[in-house]
Image (cartoon, grey):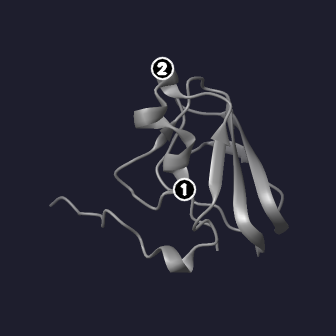
């Protein structure tokens, strides 16, 4: 049986709500379909897809916040824990292809 995911997440529970994202690369430079903003839009049917296997994405939160948990989608990344900040950069150091992030969810 196929499990269906909700298209939109309850945005109010995540500190990434209203965040702005910027990435070092985008798959085929196609920001319309793979842009960094899709990593923080809380829509699991969209994603940021990097143009390289080693990549980075920067997220600017709308306010400073503390978080120490990260979701999934990469094999290895660098992120200090816990982190109190208004923005952060994730450096993907290893991936199994082009990294894709469907939804950055920080709490």
SS type, badge 1: helix
Q: Looking at the picture, does residue 10 appear above or below residue 85?
A: below
Quadrant of the rendering where the C terminus is positioned: bottom right
Q: Residue furthest bottom?
A: 13
Label 2 CA crowd tier, 10 Å (few <14, some 14–19, many 20+): few
Quadrant of the rendering where the N terminus is positioned: bottom left
Tell me residue 17's x, y (percent): 57, 68
Residue 28, disc? 2
Q: Is residue 76 visible?
A: yes
Q: Looking at the picture, does residue 52 appear above or below residue 72?
A: above
Which comes sooner in the sequence, label 2 or label 1? 2
Q: CA distance from mark 2 to mark 1?
A: 20 Å
Residue at x 48%, y 48% (from the top left corner): 38
User: Which residue is tagged 1?
Assistant: 40
Tell me residue 35's x, y (percent): 51, 38
Q: Is residue 73 visible?
A: no
Which quadrant of the figure has residue 52?
A: top right
């Amino acid at each position: 049986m196929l499990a269906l995911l909700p298209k939109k997440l309850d945005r109010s529970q995540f500190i990434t709500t209203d965040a702005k994202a910027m990435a070092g690369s985008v798959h085929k430079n196609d920001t319309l379909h793979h842009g960094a903003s899709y990593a923080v839009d809380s829509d699991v049917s969209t994603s940021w897809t990097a143009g390289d296997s080693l990549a980075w994405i920067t997220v600017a939160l709308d306010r400073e916040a503390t978080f120490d948990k990260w979701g999934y989608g990469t094999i290895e990344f660098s992120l200090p824990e816990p982190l109190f900040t208004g923005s952060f950069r994730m450096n993907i150091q290893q991936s199994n292809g082009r990294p894709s992030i469907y939804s950055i969810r920080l709490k």
